[in-house]
Amino acid sequence: MEYVIGEWDKMAILQKVMEHKLVYLETKDVVETTLALDNFKRACDCGRGAVFLSVARGKVAEGIDFDRHYGRCVVLFGIPYQYTLSHVLRARLNFMREKYSIRDNDFLTFDAVRQAAQCMGRVIRSKTDYGVVVLADSRYNRQDKRSKLPPWIVQFIRESSLNLSTDVAVDQIRAFLKVAGQPIDQQALQAILFDQQQVGELAKQFAHHAAAAPVLPALPVPSKAVEAGPGASVVDEELLLEELYQREMLQATAGEEAGPMEVEDAGEVTWQPVQQYPSSLFLFEDILDDVDDEK
């Protein structure tokens, strides 16, 4: 980031930005960064406005909330891949490749896109918050990258928002902010939110539904899962689809709906009403916990 800022300064880009907004940046010094954040918020409070430059995987990109008027736009340059020559990363990649048969590129891409999503989420901190996210890298146009983003981000990515020129992007952002910046109708907002009593009734319904869920017979663990070792999570996509097909066969005979698979041990597979996984890559979250436990 220091090199990029230096080049922007030579090209007089920062001078043009500072004609409209103040510019602050994250440094390696914690005290300087904290002071820069305080001044950034003061500039936003007084109406002057400011731009804060930071790095992905840093303190600001992961631990600071830019809610309300403190954050209305995130511009993400590049895809935040890890430093691949790190000994810790190499050990983790070897562990997942040997124990879970996860390819290095799959994990690195998933991890980088997850960090990108972490940066995007800095501006959306509540139901009434809004903001603009600019992905300034053509690689985000590829389906293999976009498919690894969380659903709450994917639902807003339309084909009409891809491969935009600067002029078209500015026009779309201007039109969006004009609509999103209007005052919130508090009566309409309260009408769509549940009160405490309604939340309690909904919780009772979910508890009753979970208690009434049938217990389906156990299935033998497939050979691929047995080879992975006791307690291994099934992350192979073809294997997962095969097991889902078997679940549908059981569902047809039992007449009830069951959740996706969870491997409890090397002897049996049970079905639990848990969250559906659309792809084997989303199982990386659970596997990372196992990696940390092994350390």
Image (tube, rainbow, N blue to C red):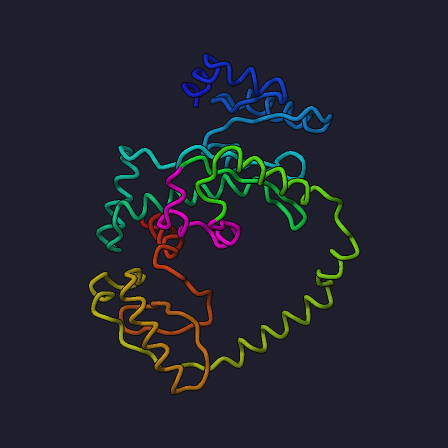
Determine whether 246 is above or below 138 in the image. Answer: below
Q: Position of residue 153 (x, y in %)?
A: 51, 50
Q: Position of residue 183 (x, y in %)?
A: 76, 45
Image point (62%, 22%), residue name: 21
Whether residue 143 is in magenta: the answer is yes
Which quadrant would residue 136 be assigned to in this image?
top left
Which quadrant would residue 253 be assigned to in this image?
bottom left
Determine whether 155 is above or below 124 in the image. Answer: below
Image point (41%, 62%), residue name: 277
Q: Position of residue 195 (x, y in %)?
A: 74, 63
Image point (71%, 60%), residue name: 193
Q: Is residue 190 left or right of residue 56?
A: right
Q: Is residue 285 left or right of residue 89?
A: right
| Image quadrant in which the C terminus is located | top left
Determine whether 2 is above or below 77 in the image. Answer: above
| Image quadrant in which the N terminus is located | top left
Whether residue 235 is in magenta: the answer is no
Magenta residues (range):
138-159
